[in-house]
Image (cartoon, coloured by chain):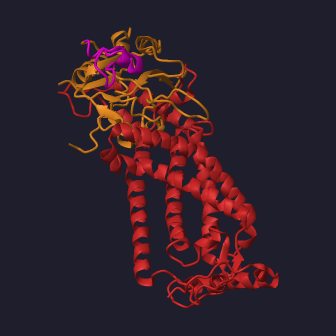
Chain colours: A orange, B red
């Protein structure tokens, strides 16, 4: 079975933010929540690079490890999902996440956080696939429809790749060889390095 | 933990150098041969090199209002994870089991510390209503705060298998609410205690003798002189007031997430909050023991507020003399006959 991953080719990303918009629209993500964002490093200087970043669906996911209520789970395709019925909005996953992926709606008093929201790799949540309740809580389940994440599907420069990790790694490697340079698959050594060494 | 602001110029310079090297250098180099799918993914060296040299976050600019999202990668989360899932869990489990074991051994060997002279019929007012209010508002809120806090550390391991995930989430959700709101009476309690008791808790020379005699805890019939509070109680007082203040301050940083600090600060606040709380819990378990089953007559001080004069003579001799000088003891009417301890 495929092991789903994201890969952003920083040599191609033009910071158009279409991935961000597509994601918000596809999943009807509320105001203040960004499942995906584009970060520009060295803005306005030589060597400027933009990288589209969301949950990387880590191999040994830190969010999953630190969650006090154990609300995360991993699908057979390596997608890290969570149950909003179990989440208590403690914010621990944000402290642990290397990519700043978990987002919280502000509800009630103080800085009290509602149930966490993050990129689902367009794979919904624990509810039955493609049901209204699943859509309401987690957004569209494109994987169940046989489609890949919309952010990468509609990326105009094909900077953002989503799909089977081996295939997208091959595509990227081929690009690096052809053009002769590449600043690396951002986040890969953090997200997919096998900590156990297995 | 990281300090993004302090590191920013170094970071920008490094990113620039690295990217320039990649960009410029690669033209002269022979391209990397396309191998089969490596386990580590394509061309990861730059990212690893970046982390080694930066030892921190990869930070940039975003066009959305949430400036926290401008941090592309923050590896410190892994250290915080190690603390939360490793160090904190091991150290708190060991210290909690340790203190309970130590108290059980103490109880088995020393037994309940009796009033050597037996209870008298005379009682003396030790704590008035305000003092007891300050104590109990702190005590009750602390108990709930401690239990709901420990729930976040051990609940997943101990309670989910017992309750199931849904019931545990309900419990932890209400626990979080209780933890947030009870912080206010807790702070009120420690502030009151500080105001009322600070003058009795300044260390002085009677404490030296008390500490040398280990408070008479390990020797029957030995009662070093003490004023209103002995050295042990002073230690508890300062632990609760100073420790409680820091726990409360770090707690409010967590309660108002990212108002005052960045993700590194939040991680540090959680670390300080959790580590110090465990220390307080361990100290308070000892305090609860000696104030209840550990010592005859001790609970009355915070119960009715009136203690047996013989108890006071043995444990707070200098304070009792002072009270007698003021003529407060004679006014106290004897309350009911109590059978001798034996």
Q: Is residue B186 above or below residue A198?
A: below
> Predominant secondary structure in magenta?
loop
Classify B310 as above or below B44: below
Camera-nearest residue between B217 and A180:
B217
Q: Residue at x 68, y 59 (%)?
A: B133
Q: How many marks?
A: 0
Residue A96, picture quadrant: top left
Rendered location of residue A2, percent (x, y): 20, 24
- The front one of B20 and B104 is B104
> Residue A33, can we see it?
yes
- Residue situated in front as seen by the camera: A32 or B54: A32
Instruction: Report if residue A127 lies within the magenta region.
Output: yes
Residue under the point 42% across and 36% down: A97
Q: Position of residue B327 (x, y in %)?
A: 81, 82
The image shows residue A124 at horizontal and vertical percentages of 33, 20
Left/right of residue B311 with respect to residue B74 in the rendered view: right
B193 relative position to A180: left or right: right
Identified at 39% across, 27% down, the residue is: A55
**Left or right of A37, for residue B27:** left
Instruction: Residue lying at the far right in this picture: please name it.
Output: B326
Q: Is residue A115 above or below residue A129?
A: below
Q: Is residue A177 left or right of residue A139?
A: left
Residue A96 can be seen in this image = no
Residue B113 vs residue A128, the one in the foreground? B113
Quadrant of the image occupied by residue A180? top left
Q: Residue at x 25, y 25 (%)?
A: A165
Magenta span covers which residues? A122-145
Magenta segment includes B220: no
Percent x, y of residue A83: 36, 30
Above or below B300: residue B334: below
């Amino acid at each position: 079975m495929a092991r789903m991953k994201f890969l952003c080719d920083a040599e191609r990303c033009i910071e158009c933010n279409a991935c961000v918009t597509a994601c918000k629209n596809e999943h009807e993500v509320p105001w203040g929540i960004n499942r995906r964002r584009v970060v520009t490093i060295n803005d306005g200087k030589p060597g400027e690079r933009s990288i589209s970043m969301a949950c990387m669906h880590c191999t040994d996911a830190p969010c999953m490890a630190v969650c006090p209520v154990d609300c995360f789970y991993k699908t057979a395709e390596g997608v890290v999902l969570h149950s909003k019925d179990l989440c208590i909005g403690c914010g621990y996953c944000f402290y642990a996440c290397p990519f700043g992926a978990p987002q919280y709606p502000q509800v009630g008093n103080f800085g009290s956080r509602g149930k966490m929201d993050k990129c689902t790799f367009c794979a919904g949540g624990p509810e039955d696939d493609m049901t209204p309740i699943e859509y309401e809580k987690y957004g569209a389940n494109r994987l169940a429809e046989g489609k890949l994440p919309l952010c990468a599907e509609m990326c105009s420069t094909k900077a953002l790749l989503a799909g089977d990790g081996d295939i997208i790694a091959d595509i990227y490697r081929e690009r690096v060889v052809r053009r002769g340079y590449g600043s690396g698959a951002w986040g890969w050594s953090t997200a997919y390095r096998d900590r156990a060494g297995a | 933990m990281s300090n993004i602001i302090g590191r920013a110029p170094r970071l920008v310079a490094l990113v620039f150098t690295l990217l320039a090297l990649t960009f410029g250098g690669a033209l002269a180099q022979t391209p990397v041969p396309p191998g089969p799918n490596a386990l580590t993914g394509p061309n990861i060296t730059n990212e690893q090199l970046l982390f080694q040299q930066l030892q921190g976050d990869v930070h940039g600019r975003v066009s959305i209002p949430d400036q926290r999202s401008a941090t592309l990668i923050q590896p410190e989360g892994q250290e915080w994870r190690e603390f939360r899932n490793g160090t904190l869990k091991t150290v708190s489990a060991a210290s909690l089991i340790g203190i309970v074991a130590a108290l059980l051994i103490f109880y088995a060997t020393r037994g309940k510390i009796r009033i050597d002279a037996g209870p008298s019929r005379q009682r003396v007012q030790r704590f008035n209503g305000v003092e007891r209010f300050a104590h109990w508002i702190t005590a009750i809120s602390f108990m709930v705060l401690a239990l709901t806090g420990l729930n976040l550390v051990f609940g997943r391991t101990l309670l989910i298998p017992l309750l199931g995930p849904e019931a545990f989430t309900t419990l932890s959700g209400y626990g979080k609410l209780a933890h947030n709101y009870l912080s206010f009476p807790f702070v009120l309690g420690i502030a009151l205690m500080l105001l009322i008791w600070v003058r009795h808790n300044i260390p002085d020379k009677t404490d030296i003798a008390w500490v040398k005699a280990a408070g008479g805890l390990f020797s029957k019939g030995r009662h070093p002189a003490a004023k209103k509070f002995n050295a042990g109680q002073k230690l508890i007082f300062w632990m609760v007031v100073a420790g409680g203040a820091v726990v409360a301050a770090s707690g409010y940083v967590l309660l108002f997430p990212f108002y005052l600090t960045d993700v590194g600060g939040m991680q540090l606040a959680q670390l300080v909050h959790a580590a110090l709380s465990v220390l307080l819990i361990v100290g308070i378990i000892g305090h609860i023991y000696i104030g209840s089953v550990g010592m005859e007559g001790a609970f009355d001080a915070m119960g009715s507020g009136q203690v047996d004069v013989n108890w006071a003579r043995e444990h707070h001799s200098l304070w009792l003399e002072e009270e007698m000088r003021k003529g407060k003891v004679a006014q106290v009417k004897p309350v009911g006959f109590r059978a001798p301890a034996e």
